[in-house]
Amino acid sequence: MNEVYWLIMLALNFALIMVAFRLWGRVGLFVWVPISVIVANIQVTKNVSLFALEATLGNIVYATGFLATDILSELYGKKESYKAVAIGFFSLLSMTALMQMALLFEPSASDIAQQSLSTIFSLMPRIALASLSAYLVSNLHDVWAFDLWRRLRPGRHTLWIRNNFSTIVSQLIDTVIFVAIAFWGVYPWQVLWQIALSTYLLKWVVAILDTPCIYLARSWFEQGKVMGAGGSGDEVP
């Protein structure tokens, strides 16, 4: 059943990011980026079995952050993508600091949440360090690579090339950095390589499957169906 839930999760994430873009344009994408980063860093603490491999949750929602920056780069330019990366970085940093402070408070006798919060967020400093490092390096590469491919292969018909080529390499960078920092020494090697392999493969699948979303986003934008678009500076580069 995990594979079925994974596909449902995939469809739900794509639907949510497209709804956010349709309703609020670039603002919706700016909102989605911190959602994807924060939710992914909570979900990643849960291990599951997917397609006969040990895997962590959070791969789908994290990968949609790359979709958001690719849409921003395609429709609004590289500077807006970098702004989204900065917002995501700040959001993750803020969540980590705030939740570590929350754990320092002495719970009352009636409290029912401290143990659960501690189980999840006591891992957060190491996971956050891994995620902050991986997020910053991989997303900056993704924005740079997408813009490079857009200049090399401009036009609607080559959109799938810049979307996939930039994201697939960026996801590899992200996976190597994150798994090495977050889980080295935590899991035995047999589990570690499965997590690394499954993480990259699942993110790669998401990157391939999100291609129709970026075409749909461009189509909505060009047809004036994006509620948050309009005005100078909102033309497709």
Image (cartoon, rainbow, N blue to C red):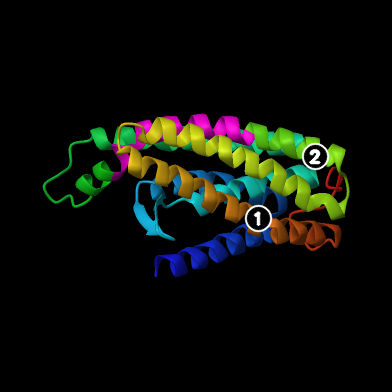
Q: Is residue 97 above or below residue 28?
A: above
Q: Is residue 214 above or below residue 196?
A: below
**Which residue type carries mark 2?**
Trp
Taking depth in this image into account, of 122 and 150 the one nearest to the observer is 150
Horizontal and vertical percent position of residue 231: 85, 48
Q: Quickly name the residue at label 2.
A: 149
Checking the image for residue 208, the label placed there is: 1
Amino acid carrying label 1: it is Ile
Q: Tell me the element at label 2.
A: helix
Seen from the viewer's position, the closer of residues 52 and 159 is 52
Q: Counting other residues with Cα less than 10 Å from the Cα at mark 2, is it few (<14), some (14-19), or many (20 or more)?
A: some
Write down the region rendered in magenta: 120-139
In depth, the one of 82 and 127 nearer the eye is 127
Task: Determine whether, in the image, residue 101 is placed left or right of residue 15.
Answer: left
Q: Is residue 37 left or right of residue 155?
A: left
Q: CA distance from mark 2 to mark 1?
A: 16 Å
**Can residue 131 be seen here?**
no
> Where, quadrant-wise, is the C terminus in this rendering?
top right
- Residue at the image position 50 percent from the left and 29 percent from the top: 133
Give percent across and percent down for residue 174: 54, 37
Q: Which mark is residue 137?
A: none
Sequence-wise first label, 2 or 1: 2
Location of residue 208 (image quadrant):
bottom right
| Residue plotted at (41% across, 41% down) | 193
- Residue 16 image-quadrant placement: bottom right
Measuring from the top left, give residue 10's x and y in whole percent. 54, 62
Of residues 72 and 167, the one nearer the viewer is 167
